[in-house]
Amino acid sequence: MSETSRPALTIRMHGDDNVAIVANDGGLAAGTLLPAGVPGAGITLRDKVPQGHKVALTDIARGAVVRRYNVPIGYALKDIPAGSWVHERLLQMPAARALEGLPIASFATVRPPELAPLQGYTFEGYRNADGSVGTRNILAITTTVQCVAGVVAQAVARIKSELLPSYPNVDDVIGLEHSYGCGVAIDAPDAVIPIRTLKNISLNPNFGGEVMVVSLGCEKLQPDRLLPPGSFPISDERDPALGPETVCLQADHHVGFMSMLDDILQSARPHLARLNARRRETIPASELVVGVQCGGSDAFSGVTANPAVGYCADLLVRAGATVMFSENTEVRDAVEQLTSRAATPEVAEAIIRELGWYDRYLDRGRVDRSANTTPGNKAGGLSNIAEKAMGSIIKSGTSAISHVLAPGEKLKATQRGLVYAATPASDFICGTLQLAAGMNLHVFTTGRGTPYGLAECPVIKVATRSDLARRWHDLMDVNAGKVADGEASIEDLGWELFRLMLDVASGRRKTWAEHWKLHNSLVLFNPAPVT
Ligand code: CA
């Protein structure tokens, strides 16, 4: 008997899998007979199986492989009869694939069927002087150090209430607040990561090339170190050799707090005026730079939302756009699929270099990729990182991987197509690093549910299950649960998402996170020591 009104439904990802997941809201009770037409038809459930969790489709002997997505996600710790609930306590996780002897760039020799170019799709965006395109028109105030955060927050509030009404074409004013800048080993080799991340975020296409900096004065990360003169375009007529335009709170001319706020407001005016003069223009879809990630994943992530995002990723690549996927610990178990899909041997080597660096980073903390999974992932049916990884990389679609970015690096204008931006899987850190890479649109899939959003860039959230989409109707932008309900195909949803992206990029539609102003903090990835 199903606990819901719908007939019992199971979903198997590959014909050779010996487990399927239960799709029904509320799961299925012990004693349920799986009906004709679904994987495992004729099997009676021996246990209650929660929604999103796995059921054994055959008798699985102790030590035998448990297979999902046609890859081993674990080995049975005891005999598992058909119809049993297969949960993480019954599985031994497979070892991570060594980074030696991987298949390299098979795509270079065995070309997959060429995806036909997709032409004629456009959006309305803001063309920047460097050729990049913004989907929003935002004044972002760069900060060199956390010490100035409170002052900048008050300055931003005053700019919004006192100045912004006079500049109606400017979407927002934000302070790029962070926890870095001082009290850190700034000369440690890995300090390059947080420093270039901050620099590159201040150059994100949604900020129109308008760089203004608020500094304390005595901090380690001096403005010239963050934004070396000549290393970034300057929007106004000032001499580029002067470096970034900076308000320094410790400057002698400041007497009292109001003097600092007035200085920041005064400095903001010309930037607001230039941003306000910009207008959206029709731009080919090839200028989209879409960052995809998932968070609060469940077993449906890899069945509904992530495959739909993957289909959409292929549409974007066909349209000449850039798609970044990330999350080192969630691709580690699929590394041979990534190195096979590399467009060139150099790209495959870069993937191995980044994942090897990350293995050693985790090793320093005496953990490995298995530290990734959360209690919520497991409650949602994901037994371990091997299973989670297979569902995660589906977001990347099927095209060849054309480039690899190290954490905090920025895409070059020539780097298009499918890009692996090597970042931690942490939602906030991944989003922060994708902003630094130049993301102008963000897609985020979730099964357990997260209200995640960014002030810097629109975030389209995709629910993996209809139950979540119903309950969080004013937080989720797309319901991929329609796939599990049999109401839409992966292709339908991929196209729905693609069209929604063009609308959101054009400012015709706001995401729910924008509507409610749900903004997560920038969280820098600092693998270097603090002092
Ligand atoms: Ca994530």
Image (cartoon, rainbow, N blue to C red):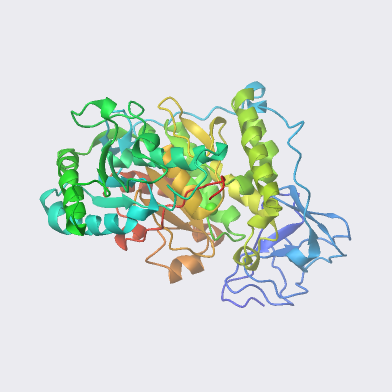
Would you say 511 lies left or right of 394 here? left
- In-front residue for pair 271/70: 271
- In-front residue for pair 225/423: 225
The x, y position of residue 309, in whole percent, is 50, 47
Would you say 116 lies left or right of 65 here? left
The x, y position of residue 407, in whole percent, is 52, 39
Say if 401 sits above or below 505 in the image. Answer: above
- The answer to whether residue 481 is visible is yes
The x, y position of residue 33, in whole percent, is 72, 72
Quadrant hosting residue 376: bottom right
In which quadrant of the rendered image does the N terminus lie? bottom right
Seen at 66% across and 34% down, the residue is: 352
Residue at the limit of the structure toward the top, as seen here: 109
Seen at 57% across and 59% down, the residue is: 297
- The answer to whether residue 203 is visible is no
Disc tally is 0
Seen at 57% across and 31% down, the residue is: 400
Say if 452 sits above or below 361 in the image. Answer: below
The x, y position of residue 166, in whole percent, is 10, 50
Would you say 215 lies left or right of 470 here? left
- In-front residue for pair 75/41: 75
- In-front residue for pair 82/104: 104
Would you say 271 lies left or right of 357 here? left
Residue at the limit of the structure toward the left, as seen here: 166
